[in-house]
Image: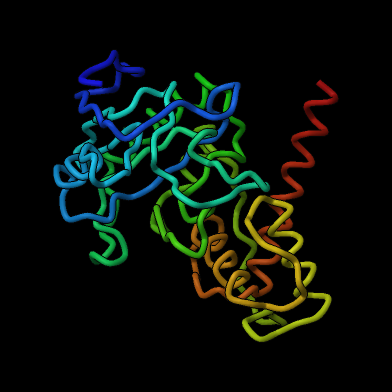
Amino acid sequence: MTGFPADSPLVDEICASPNFNDRRMAGGPSMLILHYTGMGTGEGAVRWLADPASEVSCHYVVHEDGRVVQMVPEQHRAWHAGQGSWQGVCDINSLSVGIEIVNAGHAGGYPDFPEGQITKVMRLSAEIVARHRIAPERVLGHSDVAPARKQDPGEKFPWERLAAAGIGHFVSSAPMEAGPCLSPGDGGDAVLRWQRDLASYGYELSPTGDFDEATRFATIAFQRHFRPACVDGVADLSTVRTLKRLRQALVDRGARSLVS
């Protein structure tokens, strides 16, 4: 594939990647996955994503200055999510559109996302969500679908702003306060309930009643997205109550749609 028509008028450049194949599930994409590149430069990231040897790609790259590069048509399966799961489904690439946001990431000092970049990510995401009728709760970060492997786009990413613009599912975090918490090494019914709640929302987690490494990683991923004030892998009152708020908001939205 040497070139193709852009799927969005926001695209400034086509840089076709050979790293794609056909989607393995019918119906088109139903998820939007946001990443950061985790590399020193955007140009380097684009070269890597277009290199057959890398065996990775994405649909879009958004540079720091807001320039948008499309690398794979949305109709195809880009190789951006790797091994992961959401709501029990493992082939995230077949279900999703992937946007890579140029940022050096945690290993590179994790700089702030520039305003122009975020504005363009929001506009592009809004288009994709509308085009494919992607549900708000299926706009996710790479760390959500691969908690043990990934940190991106991380706790600095403005998920709340996206949700306010109609992109993604978000609620205000419950206040931080002292009280009982669950942490690695704990066990029992409270841990089992926390694991079940995380798994019910979508995180890949087997409820065992033991606060193991998988639970810690899923808790960290949840905090990065929904309770970024403190990302420590401890299920404190704020973290637990924020998840309850999220789940209740989905129930309330479903009830409103039935009434209307």
Quarter of the image for residue 179 reads bottom right
Apparent side of residue 183 relative to residue 253 in the rendered image (left or right):
left
Q: Residue furthest front?
A: 53
Residue 107 coordinates in the image, percent (x, y): 28, 67
Q: In which quarter of the image is the N terminus?
A: top left
Q: Is 102 above or below relative to 241? A: above
Apparent side of residue 81 relative to residue 59 in the rendered image (left or right):
right
Q: Which of 2 and 143 is in front in this view?
A: 2
Please count the marks in the image.
0
Q: Residue furthest bottom?
A: 185
Q: Is 260 above or below relative to 40? A: above
Q: Which of 114 and 146 is in front in this view?
A: 146
Residue 98 coordinates in the image, percent (x, y): 41, 37
Residue sitting at x 73%, y 42%: 250
Residue 223 coordinates in the image, percent (x, y): 54, 63
Residue 230 coordinates in the image, percent (x, y): 50, 71
Apparent side of residue 66 relative to residue 29 in the rendered image (left or right):
left
Q: Nearer the viewer, residue 153 or 59?
A: 59
Quarter of the image for residue 75 reads top left
Display colour scheme? rainbow
